[in-house]
Image (tube, helix red, strand yellow):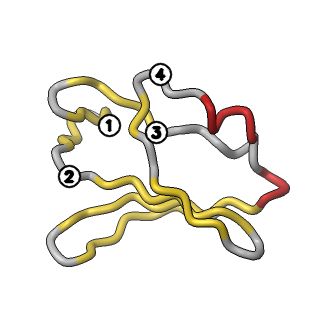
């Protein structure tokens, strides 16, 4: 599993790459107060890209348009 932050043009993203064997597939369907990622399927795993546009990070918490959000938990 890889995690990180990268910048593309003027936008900031969190990325996470998870191998298929470590995925919890049923969590893809859960959409409570979560920041939904864009999913990119690859041969060895799935790449999740979370756009941080309109997000604020304060005290290790992520806020999207004023609401506290969590990232989608897909790995074991």
50, above or below 69, in the image: below
Question: Nearer the N terminus, badge 1 or badge 3?
Answer: 1
* Res. 47 image quadrant: bottom right
30, above or below 51, in the image: above
The answer to whether residue 61 is left or right of residue 70 is left
Question: Nearer the N terminus, badge 1 or badge 2?
Answer: 2
x and y percentages locating residue 65 in the rendered image: 16, 32
Question: Nearer the N terminus, badge 2 or badge 4?
Answer: 4
Q: Nearer the viewer, residue 18 or 3?
A: 18
What residue does disc 2 label?
A: 53
Residue in the picture at 46% in, 62% down:
15
Question: Nearer the N terminus, badge 3 or badge 2?
Answer: 2
73, above or below 43, in the image: above
What distance separates the C-alpha of mark 3 from that of mark 2? 14 Å
Residue in the picture at 45% in, 64% down:
4
SS at mark 1 in the image: loop
What residue does disc 3 label?
A: 71
Question: Nearer the N terminus, badge 3 or badge 4?
Answer: 4
x and y percentages locating residue 3 in the rendered image: 52, 61
What residue does disc 4 label?
A: 32
Residue in the picture at 23% in, 41% down:
57
Residue in the picture at 32% in, 37% down:
60
Q: Dot 2 surroundings within 10 Å: few (below 14), some, or many (20 or more)?
A: few
Judge depth for marks 1 and 3 and give the one in front: 3
What distance separates the C-alpha of mark 1 from that of mark 3? 12 Å
Q: Are marks 3 and 4 in contact (CB under 8 Å)?
A: no
What residue does disc 1 label?
A: 60
């Amino acid at each position: 599993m890889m995690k990180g932050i990268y910048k593309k043009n003027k936008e900031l993203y969190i990325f996470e790459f998870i191998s298929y064997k470590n995925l919890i597939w049923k969590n893809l369907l859960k959409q409570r107060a979560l920041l939904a990622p864009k999913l990119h399927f690859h041969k060895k795993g799935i790449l999740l890209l979370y756009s941080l546009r309109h997000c604020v990070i304060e005290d290790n918490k992520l806020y999207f348009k004023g609401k506290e959000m969590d990232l989608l938990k897909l790995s074991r």
